[in-house]
Amino acid sequence: MNEKPSFRYLAAMLSLAGFLFFSASASAQWLQVFGPTGGDVEALASDAAGHIYAGTDTGVYFSNDNGWHWTLKDSGLLDSEIFSLAITPGGMVLAGTEGGGIFRSTDSGDMWEASNSGLPDGSNILSLASDRNGNIFAGHSTEGVFYSSDDGTHWIARNAGMESQIIFSLAIAPIGTIYAGAGSYIFSSTDSGQHWDTSLTLPGGDEVLALAADSSGDVFAGTLDRFRYRLLAGSGTWENISPNFSSSDFQVHALATFGSSVFLGLFGAGVWQSQDFGSNWTNISNSDLADPKIYSLTVTPSGNLFAGTYLGDIFRISGPLSVAENGASEASLSAWPQPFPGRVTISFSLEKTEVAKLELFDAMGREVLATPDAMMMAGRHDRTFDLPALPSGAYLFLLRTPSGIRMLRADCLR
């Protein structure tokens, strides 16, 4: 087994964990892993195990091997055009459709069932989001936000205080505040949508197409026009963080965050990245990204970014936290939920049978827990830890094997 890393090394890795992904983006290569199979890819989502879901014109596609192979999952999915996807902490997958409302699946998309009790007939669901308690929010094309506390069995309208009812985007901050992009407004709610306050009003004619929150609580907004905004955690004030584009015509259709990195998916200008929470931006599209019209983005727990496009393609670019690809299965290390409230499940995969050990360190490099060395079979493993006394803060999980060390930053938030 490898020697235990020094505390200085651990502290450095913890501080860098949010920055490692795409630290060498300019030299990283995009690979096309999908398309043109199902039309434009309007939604992407990934779960704690690294499974990826793609919402297209012809249904939901699924990959469990980092995008190398995709399977159409449409059994019971009566409406095939998918506008939005979300995954609850319990692993339920929800799909928002054009005209068919919401469908849900508890078996990775093998079987879908309609989930429309309380929704208007013929609903278009433009956005979906789930908080860490499993409450689900749905953004409607004409009727505002709907809420479910029972895995989508029943829905109730929650629109008090909203001036616009077209909900293009939703995002939930770690503390539970939900943000809704409603036409030219961003609304916020601290009581699961029972009341909404205007958080930001955009210039006339602009619309909020994308929202995302990172683990520190910062919130990012992308719009129809050239404006992009950031709300710093606890500040209450939005600031303009627009990249310096040569044209103002590029629309932000997608946003994703990973550590300190923020990614913009632009319709016509590819993928842009900021490694300093939105202060500076770099075009990471490169010539490998053949279709620059980006509709959707998702980042897997192992640090791979997927981009879905207007032409029905999906491209992938790998971060240095992932294991080298071999065309089949890929080792991973992920934590769920993220941030975690004290109880956390660590998922990982081994490419061969070997001795493995999990360790957890705090920001000072102090060991919080360690599992005994154990011989583990090749394949996926899940370990759940109850840590009721763990203070809020940043932590580093290490998976140690004779093959090497894999690291994952995870935040505890109570």
Image (cartoon, rainbow, N blue to C red):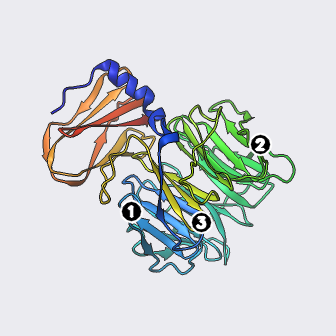
> Is residue 348 positioned above or below 58 on the image?
above
* Mark 2 or mark 1, earlier in chain: 1
Q: CA distance from mark 3 to mark 1?
A: 36 Å
Secondary structure at badge 3 equals loop
Outermost residue, left direction?
375
Label 2: few (<14), some (14–19) or many (≥20) C-alpha neighbours in 10 Å = some
Foreground residue among 212 and 393: 212
Residue 295 visible, this orientation: yes
Residue 86 visible, this orientation: no
Return the residue at label 2: 200
- Residue 68, numbered label: 1
Q: CA distance from mark 3 to mark 2?
A: 27 Å
Image spot of residue 259 (x, y percent): 49, 37
Image spot of residue 8 (x, y percent): 34, 18
Return the residue at label 3: 155
Q: CA distance from mark 2 to mark 1?
A: 41 Å
Q: Label 1 amino acid? A: Trp
Q: Label 2 amino acid? A: Leu
Foreground residue among 198 and 243: 243
